[in-house]
Amino acid sequence: MEQQTGTFAVKKGLAQMLKGGVIMDVVTPEHAKIAEEAGACAVMALERVPADIRAQGGVARMSDPDLIMKIMDSVTIPVMAKCRIGHFVEAQILEAIGVDYIDESEVLTPADEQNHINKHLFKVPFVCGCRNLGEALRRIGEGAAMIRTKGEAGTGDVVEAVRHARTVLGDIRRLQTMADEELMAFAKELGAPYELVKETKELGRMPVVNFAAGGVATPADAALMMQLGVDGVFVGSGIFKSGDPARRAAAIVKAVTHYQDASILAEVSKNLGEPMVGRNVSQMPEAEKIAGRGW
Amino acid sequence: MKIGVLAIQGDFAEHIVMLKRLNVEAVEVRLPEHLKGLDGLIIPGGESTTIGKLATDYGLMEPLRQFGQRHAIWGTCAGAIFMSKDISRAQPLLSLMDIKVERNAFGRQVDSFEADLDVPELKQVTGTKDAFHAVFIRAPIIESVHGDAKILASVADGRIVAAQQGHLLATSFHPELTNDARFHEYFLSLAD
């Protein structure tokens, strides 16, 4: 009986196992253990959380493989790591060290301003960001096995996450009402592969798992994204830039499981200490926004 | 028949789709009171540490153990880990089945795989003769079975990937990720 690895079913399958869960940014093995203990379903290993990348500026690259491997050794849950958009050699390196998922991420400085990575060439699965359905389906066309809406990372302001989730889910609802002969024109409008547009209409949802990301800072933010219709939540700077990371992390995990139960949400929102300071996206200069990265 | 799917974290929605395809009423279980009136329960794939932690925090451990004394429970992957007695590390377990499980036994995600499995009991109950195409995601193995637990399926190298103990079922793979509903039918035969 032959065993096949690296198939799209197993790539997409891991994302399905993460559903209803919280994926947390961690910068040290100690953070990773706190995240696992709090109930995170996976961690994103990186050198700096997005809020620090914003604050420090400069070119943001893939993290040191040694740091990522130390984080991999410290927990039993899946470990993800980020490479730059279009930087397929960073991706090859991350695959070689055995990370469980690669995030081809706009949070890092893009290495290619026209093309993303051909993700079909890898055994390791990829997650990519999107702001609308067209962008999501282009990434899936390139081989992404999981999607996350981008939001505006490192701000603690959920407004862009809401905007992107509403746009993607609204595009899907619009697609549901269309006649089949209208799909080609809609594919053209979205800039998305026709076959994937057709598949999305038939499924009534995106063909892969879709998480929310970028600006989630509280249990209420996480439950808001879940009620809007995403499958799970990434929390970046929101946890380890807050006053009491362990407590906030556990609260956000509970909020994602019990996202429809307001009395549980009230209970877990109590006494969490200081949230991350946050930056108001509507007052941010265009040049500082990173969601626009990605083509 | 009414089947619950533990909806703390993981691919519970995929199990519900499968159960509905078989015309079975399926409900999400997040709190102890949701177990009332159910004929069986599926514990889905996901992260066993997350599921164990939240089951503990919301008082589900003992109600789940009691449910398993009288009713059918099926754990897939993380669910199989959760149902076992021993995984050689400290994390909350239901300890319902006399099986020893090793987490992530095939390696990391790049080692996740698909393979055909020969499952004689499945063929017998569903009256079919095809192998079962199984999807393994960072999968555990069942290192050993004890007491009344018996082996249902193994991969080519002999490692155990499915076991049964009376009305309790554990698989280290994910029938809910395929279009083949036979394992769900098999489970329903135990819940009946």
Image (cartoon, rainbow, N blue to C red):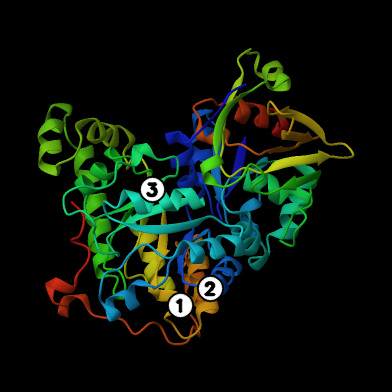
Q: Name the quarter where the N terminus of chain A is drawn.
A: top right
Residue B102 location in percent, x, y? 72, 47
Q: Mark 1 touching mark 2, by CB under 8 A? A: yes
Amino acid on which disc 1 is placed? Phe
Residue A61 location in percent, x, y? 33, 64
Q: Nearer the viewer, residue A113 or B80?
A: A113
**Which chain contains the residue that carries disc 3?**
A
The numbered mark, 1 or 2, whose residue comes first in the sequence reads: 2
Image depth: mark 1 or mark 3 in front: 3
Where A181 falls versus A155 (above or below)?
Answer: above
Q: Give neighbour class at mark 3: few <14, some 14-19, many 20+ (Cα, 10 Å).
A: many
Q: Is residue B28 visible?
A: yes
Q: Give neighbour class at mark 1: few <14, some 14-19, many 20+ (Cα, 10 Å).
A: many
**Which chain contains the residue that carries disc 1?**
A
Residue A75 location in percent, x, y? 60, 62
- Cα–Cα span, label 1 and label 2: 8 Å
Which residue position is annotated with label 2? Answer: A31
Residue A258 location in percent, x, y? 50, 62
- Which residue: 23% across, 35% down? A197
| Label number found at residue A126 | 3
Which residue position is annotated with label 1? Answer: A240
Q: Nearer the viewer, residue B14 or A184?
A: A184
Q: Is residue B72 visible?
A: no
- Cα–Cα span, label 1 and label 3: 24 Å
Indicate the secondary structure of the residue bearing disc 1. Answer: helix
**Which chain contains the residue that carries disc 2?**
A
Amino acid on which disc 3 is placed? Phe
